[in-house]
Amino acid sequence: SLHNRVYCFTNPQPFSMSSSLTHLDCCPHCGSDENVKELCLKEYPCLESIHIDSYSFPHILSVEVSRLPKLKQFVVEDHCFMHPGTVAVENACCVEDCPLLESITMGVGSFYEYSTFSLRRDELECALKSGLPLLKSLCVGGEAEMGCFSKAECFALRGEAKWSGVME
């Protein structure tokens, strides 16, 4: 329902988002505040999908998506989380402890200057056979000159996800 969706917010730390929110849909060019450097989406018990449209959150240095028990889909369109003047020693994107997560899609040029992508689950969650067991698709867009995670030396995929397919 429309009541359970957020279409855009100006502050990348959506503390005012309702805990009953089921879908987060950010419009293009969302979250351009230069003073906010972190996007943390965690502990929203009803959140089922996150969709961030193109050219959003250019100044964010760290993205955390965690402890979302109903999240099924995490989509970041093209050219998000990138700005040539916003580079740190370690720009990180971490997705963890989302037991129903089925797909992650990252568009062309998103997270371009990021050095770390971590996909993991908590050790306790591993013991309980949850965490990321349903993840079927990880699609990281890329072109020869404008891929994702250009500064990354490796990707950390930890846990026991049952991969039915991986797209590049």
Image (tube, rainbow, N blue to C red):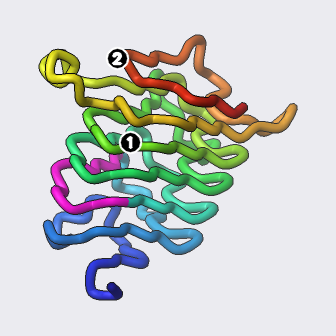
Does the segment drawn in magenta span residue 42? Answer: yes
Residue 152 in the image: state x and y as whole percent: 59, 19
Tell us which disc is closer to us: 2 or 1: 2
Amino acid type, callout 2: Gly
Image quarter in which the C terminus is found: top right
**First in sequence: mark 2 vs mark 1:** 1
Tell me what residue is drawn at x 39 percent, y 60 percent: 49
Residues packed near mark 2 inside 10 Å, few (<14), some (14 to 19) or many (20 plus): many
Disc on res. 163: none
Gap between marks 2 and 1 measured at Cα = 20 Å
The residue shown at (42%, 59%) is: 50
Q: Is residue 74 magenta?
A: no
Above/below status of 67 relative to 44: above
Task: Give the image location of residue 124, x and y in percent.
Answer: 12, 19
Which region shows up in magenta? 38-48
Residue 161 vertical position relative to residue 72 in the rendered view, above or below: above
Q: Does residue 167 appear to the left or right of 74 in the view shown?
A: right
- Which residue is at the front of the view, 10 or 74? 74
Q: Residue furthest bottom?
A: 2
Look at mark 1 in the image and give the residue it sits on: 63
The residue at the far right in this view is 144
Q: Nearer the viewer, residue 31 or 159?
A: 159
- Residue picked out by circle 2: 159
- When asked about the image quadrant of residue 61, the answer is top left
